[in-house]
Amino acid sequence: MGLFDRQEAENLQRALPLAARMRPRSIDEFAGQEHFLGPGKLLRRMLEADRISSAIFYGPPGTGKTSLAQVIARQTRREFVMLNAASVGVKELRVALDEARDRLAADGHRTILFVDEMHRFNRTQQEVLLPDVEAGVVALIGATTANPFFSLVSPLVSRSQVFEFQPLSKADVRRLLELALVDRKRGLGCEPERVADEALDFLAEVSDGDARRALNALEVAVLSTAESGHLVDLVVAQDSIQKKAIQYDATGDEHYDAASAFIKSMRGSDPDAAVYWMARMLEAGEDPRFIARRLVIAASEDVGNADPMALVVANSAAQATEMVGMPECRIILSQAVIYVAMAPKSNASYKAVEGALADVRERRVLPVPTHLRDASYPGAKRLGHGTGYEYAHDAPEGWVDQDYLGVEREYYQPTDRGLEAELRRRLEDFRKRKSRPDG
């Protein structure tokens, strides 16, 4: 490389954002993902044995998907070809595959084809990859923030190892920030004392495990105070990071995962967790009416007759949400969510209807007993419809020993929680006193 080429390369390197300059150069420099990259874990073993096959890196932004692909290419001494699925078509993809095939045939040099945002490839583009992936012409590494089992074609997923990336821990992000401060070649090369501990703690916490976001915010903070020599304190750090952009796709994993956590937290009687997941969905722009609908369902499915007021509260909250809207309806929803979370739990009503539906679908359909049939029309008596029916309100207790089904079936099994404890006692009494028909 000549003098001018070297100078040009250095200028381009300096122009990169801090997060790009601080990408790890080796596995030892890589932060996080110990669950598959730690000693003895699958990807580490594959690297040590030089048996890298096609892989899918799935996880949120800033967790190291691109960086790890580059490290793998460097460690395995393979050609690294990077494509972005949002900006290439089938033609560019075929060119990259042809070049990889020529490279392998000419000198045996293998290629890692890294496709960023792979979920943006349509089915045809994904299927173009299949023959060369299967033949080993390229080791494909696809990066995606969308669940590959939904967003990628199954033949591609079945031919690849799927590695799920997790957000970096606060300690991992803090360590990367400290390295960037003291690195004079790639980092900021400033005195660590210029940045307060509370500022580093804040950036590590608010970045949500996204190293790129934390590093770029640190660069803004340091460079914006360079001339004044001002300490990078908490206020400067807060001013240097944009409002948190919550990773949330209303039709994707984040939507379903957050909704699942919300419902399960109410079912598990944890009001703090339930309110948190509700707040996360609202802050990300979720329709509050969706939350209200899930709340109404939970009030019946998970609380039921253990506390019938839960359904009343939830339904009132749903109606108020429709009438009031955001931001005020967040308070109403919070009240109702806490009530449902703290209510005694029973899914006996849910199990009762599921059992009855299963019988309707799978067993012989029961005829309506003659004495229960409609007797209001002329000629009903000639058919015997309604004959023998006993009006329960005429009995002293408002209950009569009468068959309403024609066979012995018990679908409702009340729990001993909340109001259902009383319902259980009452139902057991009725069932003991009732004459059982055969069937």
Image (cartoon, helix red, strand yellow):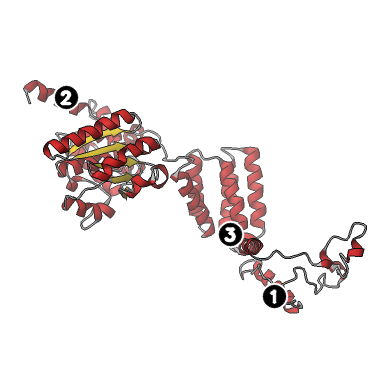
Q: Horizontal placement of 206 versus 137: left or right? A: right
The tag earlier along the polypeptide, 2 or 3, is: 2
Q: Where is residue 363 in the image (x, y as percent from the top left)?
A: 65, 65
Instruction: Name the one closer to the observer, 257 or 314.
Output: 257
Mark number for residue 302? Answer: 3
How packed is label 3: few (under 14 Cα within 10 Å), some, or many (20 or more)? many
Where residue 60 appears, x then y in whole percent? 36, 43
Amino acid type at circle 2 is: Asn
Q: Name the residue under label 1.
A: 428
Q: Tell me which residue sits at (65%, 43%) in the image.
A: 320
| Dot 3: element | helix
Mark 3 vs 1, N-terminal side: 3
**Quadrant of the drawing holding the C terminus:** bottom right
- Check residue 11 in the rendering and tell me which mark sits there, or answer none: 2
The three-letter amino acid code for the residue at tag 3 is Asp
Tell me how far mark 2 sits from mark 3, CA to CA: 62 Å
Residue 430 in the image, given as x and y percentages of width and height: 74, 74
The residue that appears at 81% across and 71% down in the rendered structure is: 399
Q: How crowded is mark 2: few (under 14 residues within 10 Å), some or many (20 or more)?
A: few
Q: Distance between the residues labelled 3 and 1?
A: 22 Å
Residue 213 against residue 386 in the figure, above or below:
above
> Under tag 2, what secondary structure?
helix
Tell me, yes or no, if residue 359 can be seen here. Answer: yes
Left/right placement of residue 84 relative to residue 194 reads right
